[in-house]
Image (cartoon, rainbow, N blue to C red):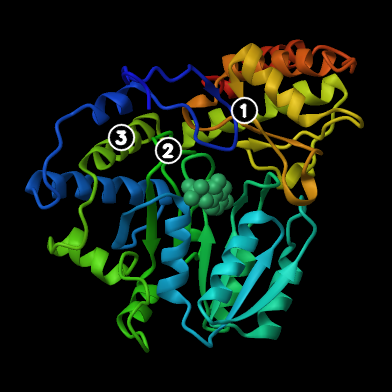
Amino acid sequence: MRDSYPPLEPPKRLLLGPGPSPVEPRIYEALRKPIVGHLDPFLFDVAAEIRELLQYVFETRNELTLVISGTGTSGMEAAVSNFVEPGAKVAVFVNGYFCERIAEMVRRQGAELVRLERPWGEAFDAGEAREFIRRERPAVVAFVHGETSTGVVQDGKAICEAAHEVGAIVIADTVTTLGNMPVKVDETGIDVAYSCSQKGLACTPGLAPITVSPRAAERLRQPSAPNRSFYLDLRLLEDYYHYRRYHHTASASLLYAMREALAIVYEEGLERRFERIRTNHRAFVAGIEAMGLEMLVAEPHRLWPLNTPRLPEGIDDVKVRQCLLNEFGIEVLGGFGPLAGKVLRVGIMGAGSTKENVLAVLEALERALAAQGWRAKASGREAAEAFYGQLSASPASTGAQA
Ligand code: PLP
């Protein structure tokens, strides 16, 4: 034990990893506000605002839209535990770590798991997705929209169409995409989408938004057995949020923070936000490529918020990350599984997606690589600046460089 425990002084970090992303002052302000009880009418008003703002961000009219107390994984577990029944056939698209996590949850649920696999860093094409679902005829299909372990975005349109043909419901992990790039739940045909608070919504970790289509909600009302999870039972959560019946002690502070985070997204507007994040992603890639590095993922399948540049042969990724953290105060993370030591995971997302941050991380990366004797072909920072310069010269791009 220590003699005393003075107030904490966390270090200042620029969070440019796969999440959490930088949190705006307005959200920290919300966290300082006095709490009310979990059954206070004020809190239910806040929850109602969260619901309508979430409908806006998910681009859905789903009535059953709420936040779960827990991180993104609780959203995943809620999706699986509420919609995957023991013995049911569940088709999972597997091309990265978080897809594997869904598959593991499906297995633990006692369902029959069927997998379609692709190497980490690749996306599934529409033809193979359709063929897999038509062949297997599962009750549930799951895919990860933005695979944070690889930087791949998976288009869900063909998956949803084929799943609906065979009467399956579709679960989509939008943990890295919500608030960062279009998710379009209704237009795509996703039945259950879950996410997190700490990436595209730029809030603190601790809440998992989830939205459920009317056809999936229907299934929820006729389960063969009650959900094995009490805490994540969506019917009980719906009772709490909509009918104000006690289920658990929801955190007022986190709900305030989420409400502010969503209000910020709404005020910026989805289109402008996505254009900002896409532009900064493109500027980052321009810098990476000018330096002579390569991106892991082929151009049409790249996630805008999460970039995975390959590390040059012989470079120690741990030393690169330590240099970024210790000398520049920048957090980025490395690859894992088959990508361990091979890529960096650089998140330029949410409120952290700014021109200033793109330039800062490119410059810091160049120096961290130079410290290990690697010489860039050209300055990544200058190439990104040139990219921004071209954009501002073109009238179509106005406002894209926030
Ligand atoms: N799914 C994806 C795609 C993720 O990137 C993550 C976390 O990074 C999760 C699920 C799990 O979220 P959490 O760590 O918030 O529990």
Locate residue 32 relative to residue 71 in the image: left or right.
Answer: left
Q: Which residue is drawn at 24% across and 38% down?
A: 253
Residue extending furthest toward the left: 41
- Contact (CB < 8 A) between labels 1 and 3? no
**Which dot, 3 or 2, sits closer to the camera?**
2
**Amino acid found under the numbered disc labelled 3:** Ala
Q: Quadrant of the N terminus?
A: top left
Is ligand 1 within 8 Å of the beta carbon of the residue shown at mark 2? no
Cβ atoms at labels 3 and 2 below 8 Å apart: no
> Residue 201 shows which numbered tag?
2
User: Is disc 3's CB within 8 Å of ligand 1?
Assistant: no
Q: Circle 1 is placed at which residue position?
A: 279
Q: Where is residue 148 in the image (x, y as percent from the top left)?
A: 63, 46
Q: Earlier in the sequence, mark 1 or mark 2?
A: 2
Q: Mark 3 points at which residue?
A: 263
**In terms of sequence position, does the residue under pointer 3 or pointer 2 come before the other?**
2
Examine the rendering and report whether any part of residue 90 can be seen.
yes
Tell me: residue 97, above or below residue 30: below
What residue is shown at x 76% (from left), y 17% (from top)? Answer: 368
Residue in the foreground of this view, choosing between 316 and 44: 316
**Amino acid found under the numbered disc labelled 2:** Leu
